[in-house]
Amino acid sequence: MSFLTHSQARAANRPQRVNSYVDYEVKAGDTTEDMDFFSSQDGRRGVRKSVNVSPRKRKLLPSELDDLANWTPMPDNDAAAGEETAETGEKRRRYESSDDPMKSWRPMLQFFLDELLRREGLGDQAESCSCCQKTFTAGCRRFRCRQCGIFIQCKECLLERHQLTPLHTPQVTPSVRTMIVLDFPHIHDINYRYCACDLSDRANNLEQLLRNDWYPATTVDPATCATFATLEIFRLTTVVGGLNVHDFVRTMEKSTDPWGVETVPDRYKAFGRMSRQFAFLGRLKRAGRAHDAQGVGATARGECAVLCWACPQEGMNLPDGWRDVEPQFQFLFMLILAIDANFRMRNRLRANAHDDPPLASGWGYMQEEKGYKAHLRNAVPEKDISTCVAFAALSQKDTRLTTGLRSSGVGAVVCARHELKRPQGMGDLQKGERYMNMDYIVLAAVWGVTLLYLAFCYDIVCQWKIRFKQRMAAMPAHMQLDLDKTTVVFGLPVWHAMAHERKCQVQNSLTYQEGVGRTDGEGTERVWSDFNELATATKEMNFGAREDAIEDKVDFHNTEKNLKQGSTLPRKLIIAIEERDRQVASFEEVDRTLNPELRQEWQAMIDDWNADRAKPNPYELDEGKNRKPSLESSIRLELAKEELDEAANGKATLHGSSLTSFLVMGLQLENSQDKIRNELKGRSVLAGEQSQRVAELRRGFFVKLRKFRALQAVYAPTAIEEVKEEDENRDADLPPHEAEAVKLFLPSGMQGVTHRADLEGLAEKEARLREGQLHDNIRRLRSRLHAKRHLLQYRNDHLVGQRGGTRAAVLMEQITENIQLAVGRYRRARKALLALRGEAACEAWKPLEDADIRLDQEREADALARERLGGVGSSSRKSTRGIMTAISSKQKKMSWIWTQGGGPDADEQELVDAVRVEWAAAKARKERWTEEVELLREEMRRVLRFLKWRALWWEDRRTVTQAVMPEVKDGLQAFAAQQAAILRQIARKFKSSWGASISIAVRTALAEDLERLAGDTALFATM
């Protein structure tokens, strides 16, 4: 048998080669082999066999490495196709439903609101059970599980279904359509189809989605929905925790696909629209706008706002005949409002912003856009100049940076006692805190108010009130107050008042304003602290989205404040009753010492001042024709006049605020530091109220310090260099200085001030102001020591035992604090004057030692003291002689402070004025705390009246008068009944807890505090 041997080499993608003896075959493979061919014996067929198989020994090509070698990521051959498409010049078709979904949604507002109310009822399947088809009889209970679905079940089916399904898993229904459904915490891409049953003939596609608790993103062929439960969760996380749309959707995306291996549809913009619409519909529903026969379009301004349950609301929570009460009780029906602005809530202009108006401008808390802007266009900026506050909001209202901002902040009006935003009580500020903005916001917030008394608390009220009546006359007629029927009073917030002049503080203090109780007027500041997180989220929003976000936040805030009235009002009452009893007892101890004629004279002075604030103020020392005016104030006015004269002659340039205002600002900052030190003095641990007060003072100090540094850079640039040097030398590991430890670097605090030409004029002006401080603080110290002597003598003469001494100590402590403040300011002013002018200039102003701060005589005999205290101010010569005997006794031991600057010269009137001021202040405190107790009890009654009225209001809405589908009518009735029941339940709970005695209320409050403290302790233990 003969045979031939052929060798065949296999290689990828190469043609076959055959030789005469060895034939190399090339084909795909990784081996090399020899092929042997044998012929059969008959020669008719051949047999092939592989021999000498071995691995191929050659270099590999990149395309032969693995399965991905022939795959090309992002092939560039598509670019040409894209260019060809672009070159055609064809524009993408535009669809209103996708380009501006809000525009197509607004006309369907009533439809969406009806569908939301429809789900409150039983829907289309109210006659029989959807599971067993059992027909419901009269009185048979119906059940629905939102997790299972919206269908109605009987009790038996409900129990049976939930025995095996404690957790619910949705089933996917085969369909020819796809839809993205956001159902927290996942984003689902599902197939679906609209129902074609008999019931579906009465419902279009949108209605089917809404009746399945799916909210569509668009009104035309929606491809994205969010479940109602998801939208409700998002709203709560937003208004409670400040979560924004981006973070919420991002959370759902990560929950759906934690590793990013799948494509999760981006529904950020769609969810933003849906959540905004859903929250707005919820506000309309809770305001009862769906129950109006005239439809949603008939909504009036502010009608969707949540009202304060405790504030007086005519026709809602005021009893019949309230206008006819005795004059001394009319304060119970006073509306007290606080006004302020928040410049953190600014809004930026965006180049890519599109037209996006609010869903309903003016229906809630923000101003109606059209009327507000028309007013601002026609208003004339005011030219008022503050003569009181050197660095308050008034002096900066026209100088705030507004470049690139649509809004520089938000002005607001809240009820000062309960901190709820007023309807129509908010508005954007375009350029600081201008009167034209704030006047409109304030008058819009009180539009329709017809109460007897109205009080405004504002940090610049001393200037704002001056021309308020004239500015109001230029407003639209429907916004003007009827001042013939409503008495308007004004006051300064307690903490902001510290920045004002002493005379201004006394003139506008809420402590001396009848009928306001112990309202502090700082409600807006506490409210803004809750809204500062929202400011960050809304800074870059479009106009409409921002306003809707603010509206929803305020709606939640007001609702929460109302619900907390059940616990806050009784706690306030406990504190008020305790403090009232203490103040009444303290005042009675002081009042017993006064001559009846003197008491009558002082009371008449208080009555005259309350009726006409132009009359002499009983709460301050008399600075009339027989008194020396405040030297510091006189010097300040004199310096300001000199600067104006220099500016008129071209010798000086005023930089917004004058040089004198800059120095006054520094002196007032020093006083603020004194206040903080006084609060901290002798206390290692602060109580809650004290800690809050110190925090408020420190925050206010740093706000004013920034403005002071800005002026310092203009008038004393070398001081700024020393400030920077101090910052550079400070240990970076140490915490920043607290407010009371900050060095201001006034000329008197800078090294070598007497030899520095750059500070010569500034130093001289400060020296003159320091002289005024020395003079005024000596006078203040004398008057306070007179008052302290009066109290000490009476305590020693008449009070026996711990009880009486404790009562007198209340006033004694307050007077002592005032004495220490005057001493500290005198010493600081003398030290500054010494640095500015040297020792020779301070010879007339001696160092004030502790031994100098003593009363001007030793205690006289008991009889003489009683005669002196009882006869001060009497017209009889005997009484006057007794007073003079007491004052003039042992004058050789009198401290120099009594003769400094001419001294009182045995002037009895100074003693009388000092005692009068303290007596009047103590009386005011007693009256305010007494009013506070009465106000709190009346507010509790008003809350219960409001809840009763609102429940009846909802009961009336159960009678549906508009022509709607039976299912919508059923939902309207069910929702109205639900709201009425909830309000009645709240009223029962409040009345039950408020009806307890004060001792039970105290024990309940303590138990709640201990429980809360235990919870906090357990929380910290786990951290």
Image: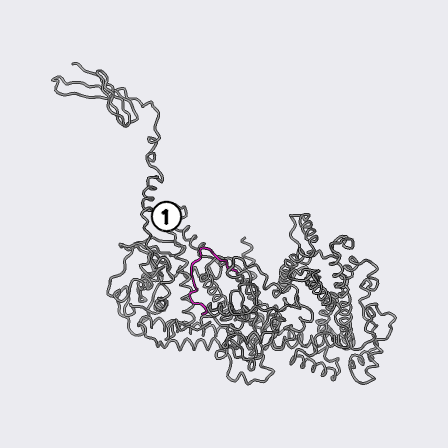
Quadrant assignment, res 509 = bottom right
**Residue 492 in view here:** yes
Majority SS type along the magenta span: loop
Give coordinates of residue 978: x percent, y percent.
40, 72
Q: Nearer the viewer, residue 375 or 391?
A: 375
In this view, 428 is above or below 599: above
Q: Amino acid at mark 1?
A: Thr
Let me know if residue 670 appears in the view.
no
Left or right of 868: which side holds 977?
Answer: left
Q: State which quarter of the image contains the N terminus.
A: top left
* Picture coordinates of residue 715, whole percent (x, y): 69, 57
Residue 805 falls left or right of residue 888: left
Q: Is residue 205 above or below residue 718?
A: below
**Residue under pointer 1:** 263
Q: How is the image coloured?
A: one colour
**Magenta residues, as a range?**
346-363
- Taking the magenta stretch, the answer to whether it contains residue 105 is no
Q: In this view of the protein, which residue sits in the foreground, 356 or 522? A: 356
Answer with left or right where residue 306 lies relative to residue 49: right
Q: Is residue 304 left or right of residue 147?
A: right
Q: Position of residue 903 (x, y in %)?
A: 82, 71
Q: Nearer the viewer, residue 359 or 595?
A: 359
Does dot 1 land on a helix, a strand or a loop?
Answer: loop
Residue at image coords 41%, 69% = 284
